[in-house]
Each structure stands twice: as C-alpha cells, then as structure tokens.
Amino acid sequence: MIRVAIVDDDALVRAVLTTIFSSADDLIVVGEAEDGADVPALVAREHPDVVVMDIRMPKVDGIEATRRLADHPGVRVLVLTTFQLDEHVFAAIEAGASGFLLKDTPPRDLIEAVRVVAAGDAMLSPSHTRALIEHFADSGRDRRRDDAREALDRLSPREQEVARGVAEGLSNAEIGAQLFCSEATVKTHLTRVFAKIGDTNRVRLALLVRDAEG
C-alpha cells in the first residue's frame, strides 16, 4: 500500500482528495494537516510515502514545508497549485518536490500521479520540464552549463544515457525499454548517478542535463 498524507488549509479540498485516494486499492490516506507547520510531526508520526502538499497556507507554506522534509529523503512531495506554472512551483521544485499537480486534475490522473511519484519517478511531463528549463535559462547560463558538464563528466557513459532519459521525462521502465535493460538495472544506475552528483531529485537531475546541453 502507498501511504499518502494530505496537507491543505481547505477542509473541503482535504475531504475530496481523501475520497479520491481512498477509492484506489493500493492507496491509503494515513493523515492530513491544514498547515505546513504541522508537516514534520505528521511525517514523523505516520511515515507517508507521498505528501500531497498545497502551496499557499497561512502559517508555513508548502515550499518551506517541503524544505523542512530534507531529513526524510524517502518521502516524496507532490505540490498542489491552481496555476500550471508559476514562481511558487519553481520554488517548490528547488525545495525538493518531485513534481506538481493542478487542483483541477481528474481523479484518475491524481491517483496515477501519486503512484508515479511513490515509485521514484518525477510527475512532470516533458513540456513541463522544458518550461522549467526556460524559466532558469536567463540567469547564470554559462556558469550553470560549466557546473553541469563537470557533474555529468563524473558519470559513466551508461549513467549519462540514463540521466538523459530522466531529462526527457521518461519513467524508469521507459528508460529501460529504450536502453534494452531491466527497470531494476535502471534503478541501480540512477542510484549511482545520484550518489555522484550529490542529489536525489529527478527534476533537478533533468535540469542538470539540460543545463549541460545548453
């Protein structure tokens, strides 16, 4: 079972999300909170696999709450937003979120998004990844390119291929099919990639690859 926690200051939103996620046989809602300030305690108590996190909350917003989960690397965060791409989404990705959902996403897609993130993949389509790249493109391009190339040079050729697959928005299974290897092998390569670059966030890995190619 995938353990899900819901963080949103709107009680109605929490109730709707609980109903949606509870309708899936492999998801269980283990807790909820109405503010980001309560997230560390919620995670420590309920040990969720995925936290579905609102961005705008009165005391501690979803960005800071995500940042406070740095000590829980096994917990994945999906941020909720009303707008497809705004500055809050970029900040949440930088804080460590694995992706984002629109609040009007259809129930079936919400459920699948939680499954995707729980499996260790990023909930960002290639178009969203491109938008993130474009957002950061105008500031420090040359420095980021040099730093990114230096980081990728530490990877083996196979690890670089896996990293490029992540940058294309592919899941582990899709990368495996593309490289003619098993999903387990892809996960092993990714573990080594993350160890070498000192990060465990697929979205930031995608940004790194795109920066290196810029």
Image: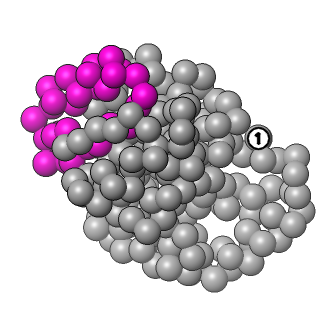
Magenta residue check for 17:
yes
| Viewer-proximal residue among 76 and 29 | 29
Q: Which residue is mark 1?
A: 135
24 left or right of 165?
Answer: left
Q: Secondary structure at mark 1?
A: helix
Percent x, y for residue 4? 26, 43
Residue range highlighted in magenta: 1-29
| Viewer-proximal residue among 214 and 31 | 31
Could you tell me which residue is drawn at 54 percent across and 43 percent down?
60
Percent x, y for residue 191? 42, 74
Percent x, y for residue 63? 57, 45
71 left or right of 165?
Answer: left
Image: 134 above or below 98: above
Which amino acid type is marked by label 1? His
Percent x, y for residue 46? 22, 53
Q: Residues within 10 Å of mark 1 (few under 14, many from 20)?
A: some
Could you tell me which residue is drawn at 72 percent across and 45 percent down?
133
Q: Quadrant of residue 71?
A: bottom left
Residue 125: in sight, yes or no? no
Residue 82: in sight, yes or no? yes
Magenta residue check for 144:
no
Image: 27 above or below 155: above
